[in-house]
Image: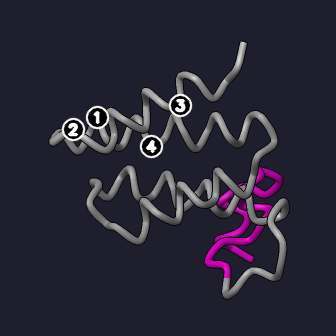
Amino acid sequence: PNYYEPLITFTWVAARTTDVQLEAEMQWVIACSHDRHGEHLAAADVARSVLSARRLPEPWLNRFRMLIIRLRPHLPGEPTAPHLSRSMVTGRCSPKRAASA
C-alpha cells in the first residue's frame, strides 16, 4: 500500500478544518508518517511550516519543536543554536543529572 494516499486525506482535513486541535493532529500524523518512512526532510518541512504559522496550541508547537530536534541529525547542513542537547532529546541523559551538571 502507498503510504502517500492517507496523507492526501490528512492534508486535506488539516487545510480545511477550523478546529485547531484536529489540524494539529493531522499535521502531526503527516510529519510522523514522513519520519517513519525515512523522509526526514519532508517531516522537517511539515514541522517548520507548523512552527512558522504559529496557529496551533503551544503543547502541539512544543511537540513539533521536539520533532525538529530529533530530526536534526538526519537533515543536511549544521543546526543553528540548538536549545537542547542531543543527549536530552534521545534520552541518554537524565534531566535530573543534566540539571546538576
**Nearest the camera: 101 or 31?**
31
Drawn side of residue 33 relative to residue 16, left or right: right
Residue type highlighted by circle 4 = Gln
Percent x, y for residue 35?
Answer: 71, 42
N-terminal label among 2 and 4: 2
> Label 1: few (<14), some or many (≥20) within 10 Å?
some
Q: Give the secondary structure at mark 3.
A: helix
Marking on residue 12: none
Split into 4 quadrants, where in the image is the N terminus?
top right
Q: Quadrant of residue 69?
A: bottom right
- Report the Cα–Cα distance between label 2 and label 3: 15 Å
Verify whether residue 95 appears in magenta: yes
Disc 3 and disc 4 in contact, CB within 8 angstroms:
no
- Report the Cα–Cα distance between label 1 and label 2: 7 Å
Q: Which residues are magenta?
A: 82-101
- Image colouring: one colour
- Report the Cα–Cα distance between label 2 and label 4: 12 Å
What residue do we see at 40% from left, 58% from top? Answer: 61
Marking on residue 27: 4
Q: Give the secondary structure at mark 2.
A: loop
- Report the Cα–Cα distance between label 1 and label 3: 14 Å
**Seen from this angle, which residue lies furthest top?**
1
Q: List the residue tagged with mark 3.
A: 7
What residue do we see at 84% from left, 64% from top? Answer: 73
N-terminal label among 1 and 3: 3
Marking on residue 22: 1
What residue do we see at 21% from left, 38% from top? Answer: 17
Disc 1 and disc 2 in contact, CB within 8 angstroms:
yes
N-terminal label among 2 and 3: 3
Rendered view: 91 above or below 51:
above
